[in-house]
Amino acid sequence: MFSAVIIITASALAVLGFILGPLGCKILNKIPAKWLCDYDETPSKELLSGNRYKVKPTGIIMGAALAAAMILTTLLTGVTITLPCVVLLYIFLLLISASDAKYTIIPDQFTIAVAVISLIFAVIDFLTDKNFITSWYAPLIGAAVGGGVLLVLDFLSTLVFKKAGFGFGDVKLMAALGLMFGLKYIIVLLVLSAFVAAFHFLYLIFAGKAKKGIYLPMGPYICIGVVFTLLLQPWLADIFRMYKMVMEMNVLP
């Protein structure tokens, strides 16, 4: 059974999520057009017009997704001291998912916000529960591994397939999230994001919607992976502890 505090908090965050969905559309319509295109690219008429996202149905879908993520996080992980950081993180991840899904761009401004939130989360977690960050240098390692893995994969894709595998926006986003997750959980995030992307790609194939040369922006999958990583953390922590116990067992006579 869930406590009254958890139920009330989850309900309040659900309402907030539904409100922020349409508001997110308005934010994405108001931000400078240059934020939603490459550095050397001239903004299109659509970007300059400010009519980029419609509240119906996009804002409603965004609100429902944000509300669902907030409810599940509160119910499964409880009302923790880091919950405000998670709520703020979800809001920016929602904006990132929407911008990358439509324009294949992750604005640097949103990534910087994610990095700041991640760093605050890391400090709080290190000083309290140590669920993700167990040492002062863990955020640095997480950022290096998160961004570094995508850089290596992008290099291999360019070398083998003669085309980029990941955008630099994905690299920067994963590095920013590494500040929050540290080494173990940034690897979990990478794996979960890959599974989500693979599952969606398989769906497109079986649904007959996959076209030759199709490009799927990675940002939304990373953002979904973040939610799954946070939701699964209590169970993953138990698995990591069991693994450590087994590795430390002296099986020799």
Image: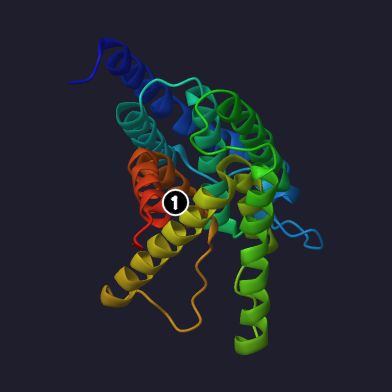
- The x and y percentages for residue 159 are 67, 86
On the picture, is 204 further left or further right than 224? left
Q: Which quadrant does the C terminus fall into?
A: bottom left
The residue under the point 59% across, 60% down is 104
* Picture mark count: 1
Q: Residues within 10 Å of mark 1 (few under 14, many from 20)?
A: many
Q: Name the residue under label 1.
A: 225
Q: Which of 96 and 60 is in front in this view?
A: 96
The residue under the point 38% across, 56% down is 250
On the picture, is 76 further left or further right than 103? left
Element assignment for label 1: helix
Which residue occupies the extreme right position in the image?
40
The residue under the point 32% across, 72% down is 202
Which residue occupies the extreme left position in the image?
1
On the picture, is 66 further left or further right than 47? left
The residue under the point 52% across, 32% down is 130
Q: Can residue 231 be seen in this view?
A: yes
Q: What residue type is labelled 1?
A: Gly
